[in-house]
């Protein structure tokens, strides 16, 4: 299984946080919190992120936040 951070997936898809927020009908701050590991992404939103970023189902997302 391959892992990619939410931010790296977004950048690779050449999208801005505002683009993702608009596509998922959330606030840009929500996207920032997802990317920084300050808020969890629900299953439906994660599915939509995979579609938006054009990622296969076997890719695991992780936050950009450093783990202790």
Image (spheres, rainbow, N blue to C red):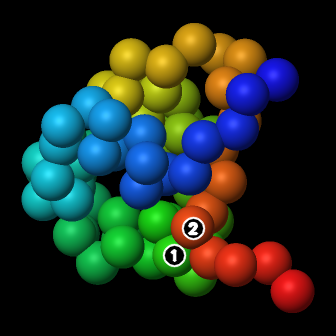
Q: Quadrant of residue 48?
A: top left
Instruction: From this view, report whether residue 24 is shown above or below residue 33.
Output: above
Q: Residue lying furthest top in this view?
A: 56
Residue 26 vs residue 60, the one in the foreground:
60
State the quadrant of the C terminus. bottom right
Dot 2 falls on a residue whose secondary structure is loop
Residue at horizontal 65 percent and vertical 16 percent from the top: 57
Residue at image coords 27%, 32%: 13
Res 40 visible? yes
Q: Which residue is mark 2?
A: 64
- For label 2, the crowd category at 10 Å Cα-Cα, with few meaning under 14, some 14 to 19 and many 20 or more, is some
* Position of residue 17 measured from the top left corner of the image (x, y, whole percent): 21, 59
Q: CA distance from mark 2 to mark 1?
A: 5 Å
- Mark 1, Cα crowd under 10 Å, few <14 / some 14-19 / many 20+, is some
Q: Which residue is mark 1?
A: 36
Does residue 66 sit above or below 8 in this rendering? Answer: below
* Image quarter in which the N terminus is found: top right
Q: Earlier in the sequence, mark 2 or mark 1?
A: 1
Q: Residue at x 36, y 73 (%)?
A: 32
Relative horizontal placement of residue 14, taking residue 62 as reference (left or right)? left
Quarter of the image where one finds residue 65: bottom right
Q: Is residue 26 left or right of residue 35?
A: left
- Foreground residue among 48 and 2: 2
Question: Observer-nearest residue: 7 or 18?
Answer: 7
Provide residue 10's location: percent of width, then percent of height: 33, 44
């Amino acid at each position: 299984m391959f892992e990619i951070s939410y931010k790296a997936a977004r950048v690779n898809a050449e999208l801005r946080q505002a683009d993702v927020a608009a596509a998922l009908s959330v606030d840009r701050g929500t996207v920032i919190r997802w990317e920084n590991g300050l808020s969890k992404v629900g299953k439906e939103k994660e599915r939509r992120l995979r579609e938006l970023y054009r990622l296969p189902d076997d890719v695991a997302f992780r936050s950009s936040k450093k783990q202790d």
